[in-house]
DNA sequence: CGATTCTTTGAAAACAGTCAATCTGTGTGG
DNA sequence: CCACACAGATTGACTGTTTTCAAAGAATCG
């Protein structure tokens, strides 16, 4: 399971085998069954988790019980409640598994130490954070500028591998639509 | 003008006077008149700019000519097209001044060197980026979960100082509404 | 097979956008 | 100093989109 992370760090952060071995002691492997929580609302998100296998989501629940999905994560992505992770405050949302999954958790403070000790890792994490930020901002632009249909199209194009394994009602939630509206958009497209 | 940045760095990054003097050589001061561009669409955003005085916005223009405002920046905030700044690609939007403004620009590579040379500055920038990310994600949550009215209320509460100096049509644009819709929301509230 | 879970469909109501007109305040040039 | 232009804000009537609620069809899983 650690092997997935090793491969990822080699390919993306250009770490050597020795450098990867320095990461290993700080990793915690965990298997999750579908529907199992990785983080529940109110807990502090102390870990950043690498998805070795499977699919997870981070979401909040509104007063009326509606779920709002803020992030999906599949293989080779990371997941956490970053607001809680950054601030140390209790999480406003939850993370659960949409499939049986395997994840590798790294404690925030171990992560910071690792990054301080390895400039390559630091550079990589900086780039990762930048891309995350840019993607988030593009999502805002997409919501405030496009129609529901355009947003849906863009989602499929941007995240085909998420699209193919996540229920439509969750994609609707991610896009800020009801499942009925998404269903009707899909109906129109065939014509 | 540099004084504003000095004060900011002292208060927020806890830099000493000597450390602040090490920043000074890399700063470029600039005054902008209202409506003047800091960055035009298609240019590469090479600088991160500190707002010493005034108010600016980053926005994109859709195919139909509609402006979509992604960020306002007033005193003690930073502004850039971060996607272009991060990637080196041409900007998809523009930055202009909503008031006569004074800004302090730092070249991306000077900024990186400064951050590398000073751990306090590095820690501060990391925190800043984290907060930026969290704010952006909260903006998404606010759009996909709240009504237009709630979003408007939240904006006023979160950014009263921006609200008080920016035209309503730009707030509408930031919120992803037409100016007419925002006007009607405001009309309702009095009742 | 029965029980979930997910998706689709229909009809009515709520909401937001468009277009056109009016109102307001500000500032500038004559 | 006034008149006028201009930018911003509002209002009304209409159109289009999305939600809501209720029900019924698929698909999936034990």
Image (tube, coloured by chain):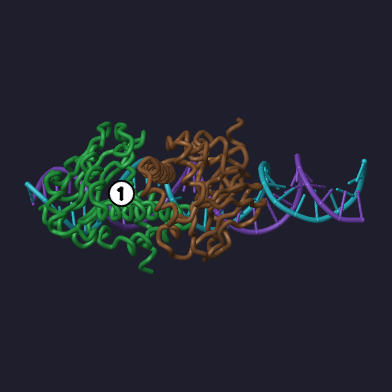
Chain colours: A green, B brown, C purple, D cyan
Residue situated in front as seen by the camera: B13 or B98: B13
Determine if residue A95 is in view.
Answer: yes
Q: Is residue B168 left or right of residue A78?
A: right
Residue A190 percent location from the top left of the image: 35, 68
Count the numbered circles shown.
1
- Which residue is drawn at the image coordinates 23% and 47% (left, top)? A117
- Which residue is drawn at the image coordinates 67% and 52% (left, top)? B33
Residue B111 percent location from the top left of the image: 43, 52
- Which residue is drawn at the image coordinates 28% and 51% (left, top)? A122
Asked which secondary structure carries label 1, the reply is strand
Determine if residue B176 is in view.
Answer: no
**Rendering quarter of residue A28:** top left
| Chain letter for the residue marked with disc 1 in the picture | A
The residue beneath circle 1 is A71
Disc 1 crowd rating (10 Å Cα; few below 14, some 14-19, many 20+) is some
Residue situated in front as seen by the camera: A191 or A107: A107
B20 in relation to D18, above or below? above
Residue A53 percent location from the top left of the image: 15, 54
Q: Is residue A61 left or right of residue B89?
A: left
Q: Where, quadrant-wise, is the C terminus of chain A in this rendering?
A: bottom left
């Amino acid at each position: 399971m650690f092997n997935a992370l090793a491969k990822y760090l080699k390919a993306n952060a250009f770490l050597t085998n020795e450098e990867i071995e320095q990461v290993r002691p700080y990793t915690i492997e965990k298997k999750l069954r579908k529907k199992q929580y990785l983080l529940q609302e109110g807990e502090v998100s102390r870990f950043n988790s690498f998805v070795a296998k499977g699919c997870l989501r981070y979401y909040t629940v509104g007063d009326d019980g509606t779920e709002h999905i803020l992030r999906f994560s599949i293989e080779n992505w990371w997941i956490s409640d970053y607001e809680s992770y950054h601030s140390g405050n209790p999480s406003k949302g939850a993370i659960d598994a949409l499939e049986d999954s395997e994840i590798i958790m790294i404690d925030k403070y171990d992560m910071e130490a690792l990054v301080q000790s390895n400039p390559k890792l630091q550079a990589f994490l900086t780039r990762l954070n930048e891309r995350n930020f840019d993607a988030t901002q593009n999502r805002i632009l997409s919501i405030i500028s496009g129609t529901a249909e355009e947003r849906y199209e863009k989602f499929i194009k941007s995240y085909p591998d998420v699209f193919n394994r996540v229920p439509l009602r969750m994609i609707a939630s991610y896009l800020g639509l009801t499942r009925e509206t998404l269903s009707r958009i899909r109906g129109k497209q065939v014509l």
